[in-house]
Image (cartoon, helix red, strand yellow):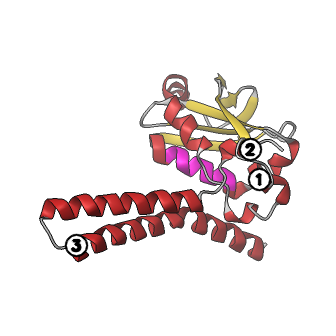
Amino acid sequence: MYLSRKCLFDGIAKTFEARNYLALIVSFSTALTMQLLPGALWADMVFGVSVGSVVLFVLKRFSKGKTIADIADVKEGKIEINGSELFVDGIYISNLLGTENAQRLFQTEGMAVVIYPREEHFRIALDNYGQRQAALFEATRAVGIKRYHFTRKDYEKGRIVIVLVPIIRDIDKFIAAVRQTPLLESLRKSHAVMKTNWVGKE
């Protein structure tokens, strides 16, 4: 259990902290170019930005990993409330909506997406708790979170649900954030997942 959690956290850290290293390298390249080139300030800025853009393009090109969009489809889910129970597309989510305020929030402001794996073996990646938390993190980073957030999985069909009450109610941003969530380091050792091409097909 300890080793499993350690690998999970290590995978999350490597995947998301890589962005910090990209920013560091790009900013260093830009600043170094501006310092080495003698000339007017505006010229230094133009060359610095140009070099930084090229470095960013190259790094992103060669460090790009797979995302949820490569192995699954992400669609808007329909929120349903039955008493204190919350459902999305018929999938039971929670029974914690015991107050009228919570029910009203989900009815008027709640958003949900459902992740559909394209192949049965893609469930290996999506069923991973860390992967679902990563998708939830990306979603809240894109649209914010006013209150409540849940992630649940459908054990029969492998669907994954992410539902929340956001600050910015923009379903397109929500879906895009989940689609662009990178697959974690710990999942890249699965040949069944990683041998797909860029559109998620064998």
Report the residue marked by disc 1: 125
Report the residue marked by disc 2: 71
- Res 2 → quadrant: bottom right
Residue 138 lies within the magenta run: yes
Magenta span dominant secondary structure? helix
Q: Which residues are magenta?
A: 131-140
Residue plotted at (70% across, 35% down): 73
**Cα–Cα span, label 1 and label 3:** 48 Å
Q: Characterize the local packing of mark 2: few (<14), some (14-19) or many (20 or more) Cα atoms within 10 angstroms.
A: many
Mark nearer the N terminus (1 vs 3):
3
Residue plotted at (59% across, 57% down): 64
Q: For the residues carrying marks 3 and 2, which lies nearer the camera in this image?
A: 3
Q: Position of residue 76 (x, y in %)?
A: 62, 28
Q: Characterize the local packing of mark 1: few (<14), some (14-19) or many (20 or more) Cα atoms within 10 angstroms.
A: many
Q: Amino acid at mark 3?
A: Leu
Res 70 seen here: yes
Residue 108 lies within the magenta run: no
117 up-or-down from 38: above or below? above
Work out whether residue 64 or residue 108 is closer to the camera in this orientation and state it.
64
Report the residue marked by disc 3: 37
Residue plotted at (83% across, 59% down): 191
161 up-or-down from 54: above or below? above
Q: Are marks 2 and 1 in contact (CB under 8 Å)?
A: yes
**Cα–Cα span, label 2 and label 1:** 9 Å
In which quadrant will I find the N terminus? bottom right
Q: For the residues carrying marks 2 and 1, which lies nearer the camera in this image?
A: 2
Element assignment for label 2 = loop
Element assignment for label 1 = helix
Q: Position of residue 145 (x, y in %)?
A: 47, 42
